[in-house]
Image (cartoon, rainbow, N blue to C red):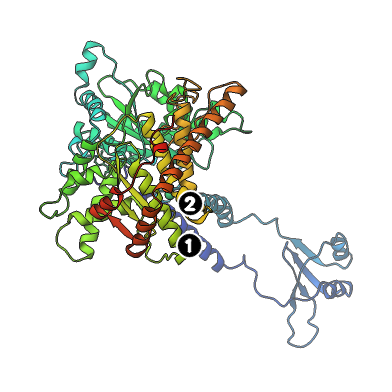
Amino acid sequence: MPIRKDDTPPNRRFGIVNLVLIGVGVLLLVSSFLPNQGMQQVPRVPYSLFVSQVDDGNVRRAYITQEQIRYELKEAPAEGAPSVLATTPIFDMDLPKRLEEHGVEFAAAPPQKPSFITTALSWIVPPLIFILVLQFFARRSMGGAQGALSFTKSKAKVYVPDEESRVTFADVAGVDEAKQELTEIVDFLKTPERYTAIGARIPKGVLLVGPPGTGKTLLSKAVAGEAGVPFFIISGSEFVELFVGAGAARVRDLFEEAKKKAPCIIFIDELDAIGKSRAGSMGVVGGNDEREQTLNQLLTEMDGFAAKDKPVIVLAATNQPETLDAALLRPGRFDRQVLVDRPDLSGRKTILDIYARKVKLAPGVDLDKIAQATSGFAGADLANLVNEGALLAARSKRTSVEQGDLNEAIERVVAGLEKKSRVLQPDEKKVVAYHEVGHAIVGHLMPGGSKVAKISIVPRGMAALGYTLQLPTEERFLNSKEDLEGQIATLLGGRSAEEIVFGAVTTGAANDLQRATDIAEQMVGTYGMSDVLGPLAYDKQGGSRFLGGGNNPRRVVSDATAQAIDKEVRTLVDRAHDRALSILHHNRDLLESISQQILEKEVIEGDDLKNLLASSVMPEEAVAIA
Ligand code: ADP
Ligand code: MG
Ligand code: ZN
């Protein structure tokens, strides 16, 4: 969709400023050429000489102004010397008396009236400078070509959907429930009469909640596209600005504009930037006045507009719904919440279909396989993946995208771009090899429906030195306790291999340990899987659901319970560690041989890997420790 800045053309405002500037310039120029009020040039002499000449009785007349004393001698000191001289006045109260005593005829100029030009300049220039400075900052803080004094203008961009660039629901896939809910909103916008006739209240605010890149922005554009109404888009962070009050003024301006264009949609991205819970920031000294004012203004505006047949619907997006101020979620505001979650297997397939249509695919490319291998990818990741695949094909001068390109693209998206420049030292490489093979062997033997598809010790991205790729064989929504225990053991497999082979551990396992501990904590705190602590949820609901948990605050528990939780988590991880160690001890030879192979080839995958892992054995004591 073409982006249009809906604003007065900046050119006009600049024109006026320029005109004033030119006018002032001309005035200055003219004034510098004007004769200095009839003062001709006369020789200047020191004041002392003037005084002695007066005392000598040699001065006939004197004309005193603020700038100079011009006087005429009775007789020139020498032949041809000028008889009219000038001197600079000094503060001398006795001068009139002295002149009188010596019979000098004298007059003073009336106090000089400032000329019209000076007056004009003194009135025009300072405000002008002020305006220019202000404008400079305004433009800097807006990063755009908007004119002077537009701090309070909302910076919303307006999309007016036109036929060919319109986004519709067909462009969004894999989020069917969200689409369904929003279809109703489209209907409101198209035929508000139908709803108001019955007396139904049209919802004002709809909050799209979900992790980044799942298509929240895209969905709201699609709502505008389907309904054929204008679409204002602004990010919450753009309201929070330098000056207290500017954000609130912007909100007012935005709704003002929107009401003119109603029916229409206002989309506020990153609502959490303004909508953070006020209670949360109470402790901060000085608070966050600006954000609070902005939030209040937003609430006021949402309560205010109620034109029945001209709805303005506010869509907003956030990935931290739990931080939002409760006032925002009350009826009449964002009382509808639509979950936009990561797509499941079939959702990923349809999203891949959409983007694969935009590139040339080689015949026989199996998108189902790609969808299977991309569990956890959001829509944006999948779009990115197809594009990476196309780039790879183009780089190797092929005319269509092949399966291999897409496979490599997955790895790129997963682990960051291959870092060709990064070279591991031989001894480091050895550690990474055993570490990854450790993951692979334990992962292969553990239950949980994942099969190890690839081991690589080619460094990728910033953090991953090597990696073991596990593909789930089927989409799973539920994990049993055994699955999770298996996952923990698999995560500890890398470190266990290092312990067995080198008798020491490296820093390479930090991320594994983090994830293993997280899973163990969730098992005890969230899923109630601990026999000791029972089916209680010790984690407070509403911890950061989308951003991987981690900072779930615990429910208020007694010290004894807290200790029991810690102990139970510890036990789970320890037990998984023991299992991993025992598996790797039993398969010590296999660990050795696969590691040697991978040091040679750097990557093992497919049937090779399957055959190698097939000879692994599960030791009795690791089957199930419960
Ligand atoms: P969000 O606002 O949730 O962070 P966006 O809507 O900005 O995500 O998504 C970024 C891009 O990713 C979109 O422009 C689109 O190309 C792609 N995308 C994301 N989700 C989907 C989806 N469900 N269907 C199709 N494309 C998607
Ligand atoms: Mg977005
Ligand atoms: Zn690891």
Name which residue lies at 17% across and 53% down.
Answer: 359
Nearer to us of marks 1 and 2 is 2
- Confirm if mark 1 falls within 8 A of ligand 2: no
- Confirm if mark 2 falls within 8 A of ligand 3: no
Name which residue lies at 59% across and 32% down.
Answer: 287
Which residue matches tag 1? 26
Name which residue lies at 42% across and 29% down.
Answer: 321
x and y, in percent, of residue 165 in the image: 19, 44
Closer to us: 190 or 80: 190
Which residue matches tag 2? 500
x and y, in percent, of residue 44 in the image: 74, 76
Q: Amino acid at mark 1?
A: Val
Q: Residue lying furthest front in this view?
A: 620
- Crowding at label 1, few (<14), some or many (≥20) Cα neighbours within 10 Å? few
Q: Amino acid at mark 2?
A: Ile
Q: Is residue 270 above or below residue 441?
A: above
Dividing the picture into quadrants, the one containing residue 207 is top left
